[in-house]
Amino acid sequence: MTEHFRCPEELIDLRVSEGLSEDSGFFSLGPDCLCFGQTSQAAPAAAVTDPMPDLLPYVSSNGTTVTFPFDPVKTIDNLRHERYFDQQGSVHAANKAGKLVRKIYYLARPFMPVALRKHLQRVYLRNWEDIPFPKWPVDFSVENLLEQLLIVSMQSQNLERIPFIWFWPESVSSCTVVTHDVEATPGWEFCPQLMDMDDSYGIKSSFQIVPEERYDVSEAGLNSIRERGFEINIHDLNHDGNLLINHEEFLRRAAEINRYKEKFQSQGFRTAVLYRKIDWFEALDFSYDLSVPNVAHLEPQRGGCCTVFPFFNGKMLELPVTMTQDYTLFHILNDYSIDVWKQQISLIQARHGLMQMIVHPDYIIDQSARRVYADLLGYLCELRAARKTWIALPAEVAVWWRMRAGLSLVREGDSWKIGGEGHERARIAYATIINGKLVYEFDRTLEDQKSA
């Protein structure tokens, strides 16, 4: 919890009760706070649709220490790492049955008409609206749990409010990252025009480049992207869908990918098709990863990390994809507007999270798609002008989040100050409980002094 809020550790003292269940399952911690993990006091539910116990009444406190009938750290990791999906056998079954289908699909994909590909994808995804968890269009299960943990801790010590280091620099409300996955030759050739488009709105983005087989990656093309202030990341190895088929093959390819990281001067990585086994990613030598969706109802591999904030996965930082991909919007949902994106932006902004989107050069060459993307860029500019979002490159977000993780709040008389390298960019915020919910606020006096 202190990793997320960066609040004073001396104000938080959490313990785990003994006798946790052998099996993990679903439970809640009060209304609208769904969790997955091992429990004591009450058996967890085997499926998210089964009646599940509310463990909030079993939380105890001696005035300073709060004891929970589950492990909060492991429960948060279970959500972020999608272990709730794995536990039910869905991932194993889908992966086992899907290996052959995936292999056949990727072998045949270059020869398929686009209309046939769209039809097959719609058939595969046809039941997406019936999936109860994670919650579409954005899932906040991790944030709900983190906030509930903080509320219980504050109540146990009769704290009316608690200071913490704000999520983003200079008290900006949220963060936006625009990324472009280049999948084929038409997309690679369209990159200069796409940079022109982004630049016309004063937005810099990252380009995820497939190193092998898909198209000819020229050094001149890479240099052009870098020189214009855009970012280059590695996108899989050859985009054949087989990166994560087995661990031995993954390790072999990971070694090749790491070499391209040095060659392309990249700091970030994204798998093809957002396939992921993030416990394997320790073999990748990158600062951050961009492969994990918040909610994946409309992705070939379902699940989702259930958070709209960056989180550490060992030495690597995960920057979750929190918005619907352009291809999905245009060709699965058949929606040529920014209504879905605006809905997701509104929800994420209300929780002050990260809005990360994937827009493919390959899929916005068409004028109708390009107009939709222009509408999105214009809308993001409005939010930026109102200081409602910080539009940043993935590497900038990673630098900030790592720096924030090294900051701490230090008591100075009756007040607090931020200590650590980069503290001048950080701001102190306060979490207050109002009607059973956390409300965030800044010390306006300090904010006025900083802006003076």
Image (cartoon, rainbow, N blue to C red):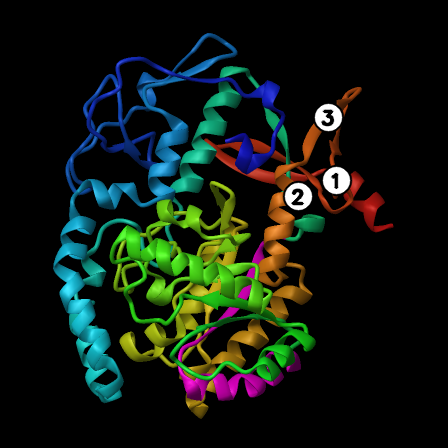
Give the residues in magenta: 173-200
Choose the circle earlier in sequence order: 2 or 1: 2
Q: Which residue is located at x 14 percent, y 66 percent? A: 100
Quickly name the residue at label 2.
403
Choose the circle earlier in sequence order: 2 or 3: 2
Q: Which residue is located at x 25 percent, y 58 percent? A: 245
Residue contact between numbered discs 2 and 1, judged by CB atoms under 8 Å: yes
Q: Is mark 1 on a helix, strand or loop?
A: loop
Q: In which quarter of the image is residue 27?
A: top left
Q: Quadrant of residue 393?
A: bottom right
C-alpha gap between disc 2 and disc 1: 7 Å
Report whether 93 appears left or right of 421: left
Choose the circle earlier in sequence order: 1 or 3: 3
Q: What element carries label 3?
A: strand
Q: Nearer the viewer, residue 241 or 428?
A: 241
Q: Which of 32 and 20 is in front in this view?
A: 20
Q: Name the front one of labels 1 and 3.
A: 1
Disc 2 residue type (three-letter): Met
Q: How many neighbours does mark 2 have within 10 angstroms: few (below 14), some (14-19), or many (20 or more)?
A: some
Residue contact between numbered discs 2 and 3, judged by CB atoms under 8 Å: no
**Relative image position of residue 131 (x, y in whole percent):** 21, 55
Disc 1 residue type (three-letter): Glu
* Vertical order, 44 against 172 (above or below): above
C-alpha gap between disc 1 and disc 3: 13 Å
Residue 239: in sight, yes or no?
yes
Residue 410's disc number: 3
Report whether 387 appears left or right of 205: right
C-alpha gap between disc 2 and disc 3: 16 Å
Q: Nearer the viewer, residue 76 or 221?
A: 221
Q: How many neighbours does mark 1 have within 10 angstroms: few (below 14), some (14-19), or many (20 or more)?
A: few
Q: What element carries label 2?
A: helix
